[in-house]
Image (cartoon, helix red, strand yellow):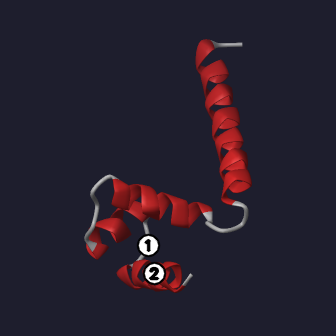
């Protein structure tokens, strides 16, 4: 197997394991998109427009996510 194929397979398996571990740690309290959102905020992204662009969603979706997380 070529090195590039091995690398892609390793990356794929790593991402799958990270997602599985994230779900287990969250105990159904935080979704993966919410976790990504909180990570982005922790890295200093604090404008709705930048968060929306970074996450690939609309500003309305970011606002809705913020409202839902604040409510929880």
At 47% from the left and 82% from the top, the residue drawn is 70
Q: Which mark is residue 61?
A: 2
Count of marks overlaid on the render: 2
At 51% from the left and 78% from the top, the residue drawn is 69
At 70% from the left and 42% from the top, the residue drawn is 16
**The one of 1 and 23 positioned closer to us in this rendering:** 23
Q: Residues within 10 Å of mark 1 (few under 14, many from 20)?
A: few
Image quadrant where one finds the N terminus: top right
User: SS for tag 2?
Assistant: helix
68 above or below 33? Answer: below
- Quote the CA–CA distance across marks 1 and 2: 6 Å
Q: Which mark is residue 57?
A: 1
Residue 15: image x %, image y %? 63, 40
Residue 48: image x %, image y %? 30, 75
- In screen coordinates, is 31 left or right of 17? left
User: SS for tag 1?
Assistant: loop
29 above or below 36? Answer: below
Residue 28: image x %, image y %? 72, 66
Asked if the residue at tag 2 contacts the one at tag 1, i.e. Cβ–Cβ closer than 8 Å, the answer is: yes
Residue 40: image x %, image y %? 38, 57
Q: Which mark is residue 71?
A: none
At 66% from the left and 68% from the top, the residue drawn is 29
Image quadrant where one finds the C terminus: bottom right
- In screen coordinates, is 67 left or right of 48? right
**The one of 4 and 10 positioned closer to us in this rendering:** 10
């Amino acid at each position: 197997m070529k090195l590039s194929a091995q690398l892609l397979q390793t990356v794929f398996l790593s991402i799958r394991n990270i997602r599985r571990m994230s779900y287990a740690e969250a105990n159904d309290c935080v979704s993966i998109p919410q976790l990504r959102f909180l990570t982005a905020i922790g890295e200093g992204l604090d404008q709705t427009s930048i968060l929306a662009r970074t996450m690939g969603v609309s500003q309305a979706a970011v606002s809705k996510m913020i409202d839902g997380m604040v409510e929880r």
